[in-house]
Image (tube, rainbow, N blue to C red):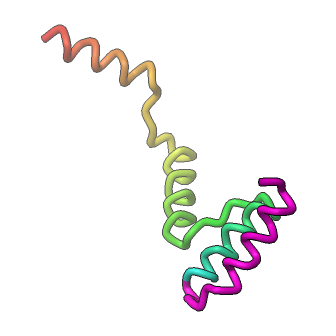
Amino acid sequence: MSTIELKEFLKAKIDQIDDDSFLEEFKNIIDNKVENEIILSKEQKEAIKKSQLEYLEGKFTTNDFVNEDIEKWLKE
């Protein structure tokens, strides 16, 4: 199926859908593809802000440190 045929097929199928929530989600997917922008929920944005603050406060562990701990634990 060519790109033009696929677009026409999708347009015809979309015209048959009456589910507003599905159409809204489909619109979001298309908007995201066109705008190439990641859409985050409020919870995701809050989690990112919290993680950034923890990083700035030095509240993180490096992979090397964790790997050393794992090696010690495995030798016990």
**In the picture shown, does residue 71 fall above or below 47?**
above
Q: Quadrant of the C terminus?
A: top left
**In the picture shown, does residue 24 fall above or below 31?**
below
Outermost residue to the left: 76
Residue 25 sits in quarter: bottom right
Where is residue 63 drawn, in percent x and y? 45, 25
At x 51% / y 52%, what residue is drawn? 51
Q: Give the number of callouts.
A: 0
At x 36% / y 24%, what residue is drawn? 66
At x 76% / y 76%, what residue is drawn? 11
**Is 31 colored magenta in this rendering?**
no
Where is residue 73 drawn, in percent x and y? 20, 17
Residue 65 sits in quarter: top left
**Is 7 colored magenta in this rendering?**
yes
The secondary structure that most of the magenta stretch takes on is helix
Where is residue 5 drawn, in percent x and y? 82, 63
Q: In the visual, does 61 lie left or right of 44?
A: left
Outermost residue to the right: 4
**In the picture shown, does residue 17 fall above or below 5?**
below
At x 83% / y 56%, what residue is drawn? 3
Q: Quadrant of the N terminus?
A: bottom right
Outermost residue to the top: 75
Q: Which residues are magenta?
A: 1-21
Residue closer to the observer: 40 or 66 = 40
Where is residue 4 drawn, in percent x and y? 87, 62
Residue closer to the observer: 26 or 10 = 10
